[in-house]
Image (cartoon, rainbow, N blue to C red):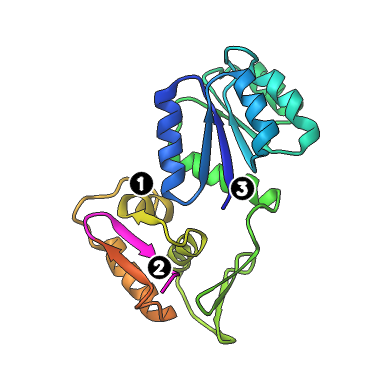
Amino acid sequence: MVNIMIVEDEKAISNLIALSLKKVGYHCECAYDGLSAIDMIEKKYPDLILLDIMLPGADGFEILEYVKPLDIPVIFLTAKGELSDKVNGLRLGAEDYIVKPFEIMELLARIEVVLRRYKKLDRMIRILGLEIDTDSRTVLKDGVYINLTKKEYDILLLFARNPGSVLFREMIYDRVWGGDYVPGSRTVDLHVQRVRKKVGWENYLISVPKMGYRLEVAK
């Protein structure tokens, strides 16, 4: 499981980000000041750091300088939206720079880009009899190609990367279609049912009442 550290002194924002990341299967740890973050980085060595700039103890630019030799990717999440701040952050070595307020879906997409760049996400996923090649976006079962639409593939990949986690209908809709989920809509359910049937996961991709679906790998 990918471990992401959130360094943000506003706990409400930190908790919201952590909750959203956990829903899609990331493991999260939070630090609320610069010195605690540095101490935690030494002990935990995360796969990715989401880093505010204006922090007590040590600011985000100082933390980035500390992290550089460790080859841990950093995405700045900050209210400092001036072009000079963004240019400075990127020149110092940040992989990305996102200005608050931001949409969670945009953050998730940018996290995936950085993780792929650092090869933290596996190109080939083997799970429950399937081979999923994330570069070619192809799916094989027992060596036989399975024809999936783009949205069906995206749904399958979400579950394959997050086995055992409950994926909420709202999150699935946001990640696959983009935009706001309409309560009561059957769009997600119908697509999940088609995916389940095409790949033969009728006994593994289970419905979680009033929430969404979970890929159950331990049977």
Looking at the rendering, in which quadrant would you find the C terminus? Answer: bottom left
> Would you name the residue on which mark 1 appears?
179
> Would you name the residue on which mark 2 appears?
216
Locate residue 104, reporting x and y percent.
44, 38
Identify residue type, mark 1. Gly
Packing grade of label 3 (10 A; few <14, some 14-19, many >=20) is some
As drawn, the residue found furthest toward the top would be: 56
Locate residue 39, reporting x and y percent.
66, 26
> For the residues marked 2 and 1, what is the alpha-carbon distance in whole angstroms?
27 Å
Q: Nearer the viewer, residue 36 or 97?
A: 36
Q: Nearer the viewer, residue 164 or 121?
A: 164
Residue 80 position by quadrant: top right
Against 194, is 141 above or below?
A: below
Highlighted range, magenta: 209-219
Taking 62 as reference, is 210 left or right? left
Q: What's the mark number on residue 113? A: 3
Q: Mark 2: which secondary structure? A: loop
Q: What's the mark number on residue 138? A: none
